[in-house]
Amino acid sequence: MNEQSSRAAAAPADQYLLTLSCPDKKGIVHAVSSYLFMTGCNIEDSQQFGDHDTGLFFMRVHFSAEAPITVDKLRASFAAIGDSFSMDWQIHRADEKMRIVLMVSKFGHCLNDLLFRARIGALPVEIAAVVSNHTDFAELVGSYNIPFHHIPVTKDTKSEAEARLLEIVREEDVELVVLARYMQVLSDDLCKRLSGRVINIHHSFLPSFKGAKPYHQAHARGVKLIGATAHYVTADLDEGPIIEQEVERVGHDVTPDQLVAVGRDVECQALARAVKWHAERRILLNGRRTVVFA
């Protein structure tokens, strides 16, 4: 074997992800695996779930292709199978970093956590911009060489602020918006436009302790578990499909300030996992719930 052939043989195969959901019926797995075999691809990992309650089938396949082939060609050749099973499906390169926008107000712990995780490669994302209705974290974001957009929001300017956000999403080719403690309620119209593309972190196990000072409310009730919930944003406030939840046990002797500190940690953990799973295309919507192939 010559040197050129040796280098070609050692070249890693291209990696891809196929995700799909459709009405559950016989033959779906066979059709997908047969397609990949006939296309010269190899299944690296496959997960599937049939929901008897909704009658839907969900699948995520990580596969490789040793022969050169483009995503567009894969999509074009898979379309017939998708149509035959009425699938909602996507194919993406596995090494493609998802472009995201982070939104924050005056609590920066989740923002700081996500910025750091992205920098060290713990999140498969590219942070295209940070948007805030305050300027508190402009310097922090600048230290990461990420564009910072200050978009003030008032009752009279809310529609203009959301229009500007949509411009950024379009201009930066953003797939996901992350509300990293962004303390503004998104309009129904924006929720619909970005359906399934906005993740929020809520400072409790939903729907408990809504409103102001949640940890003080929790302290007054003598809770023993501090929780956080990452969920998709819908027009129904804090009622979107839940992605991940995290808890930490606390004792009777903790103060409200100590609960806040514990809460910051669990919020960061739950949100980071939700963003990671979304970016790795492990989450499929199932009505008001999610299927998470973690």
Image (spheres, rainbow, N blue to C red):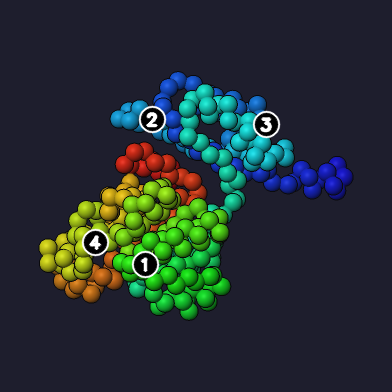
Residue annotated with mark 4? 226
The residue under the point 19% across, 72% down is: 256
Mark 3–mark 1 Cα distance, whole angstroms, equals: 54 Å
Extreme residue toward the right, this view: 2
User: Quick one: label 3, few (<14), some, or many (20+) residues within 10 Å?
Assistant: some
Q: Are marks 3 and 1 in contact (CB under 8 Å)?
A: no
> Mark 1 Cα within 10 Å, few/some/many (few <14, many 20+)?
few
Which residue is under mark 1? 157
Q: How many marks?
A: 4
At a point 48% along the width and 79% down the height, the residue shown is: 139
- In this rendered view, identify the residue nearer to me: 167 or 100: 167
Q: Nearer the viewer, mark 3 or mark 2?
A: 2
Q: Quadrant of the N terminus?
A: top right
Viewer-closest of 9 and 74: 74
Q: Amino acid at mark 3?
A: Gly
State left or right for residue 262 relative to residue 70. left
User: In the picture, residue 273 is in which quadrant?
Assistant: bottom left
Residue type at numbered disc 4: Ile
**Which tag, 1 or 2, sits closer to the chain's start?**
2
User: For the residues carrying marks 3 and 1, which lies nearer the camera in this image?
Assistant: 1
Tell me the SS state at disc 2.
strand
Q: CA distance from mark 2 to mark 4?
A: 34 Å
The answer to which of marks 4 and 1 sits earlier in the sequence is 1
Report the residue that reaches farthest toward the top.
Answer: 26
Position of residue 270 relative to residue 72, above or below, is below
Residues under numbered marks 4 and 1 in contact, where contact means CB atoms less than 8 Å apart? no
**What residue would you read off at disc 2?**
56
**Which of the two discs, 4 and 1, sits closer to the camera?**
1
**What residue is shown with label 3?**
40
Check whether the beta carbons of the residues at disc 2 and disc 4 lie within 8 A of each other.
no
**Disc 3 secondary structure class:** loop
Spot occupied by residue 278 in the image (x, y as percentages of width and height): 45, 50
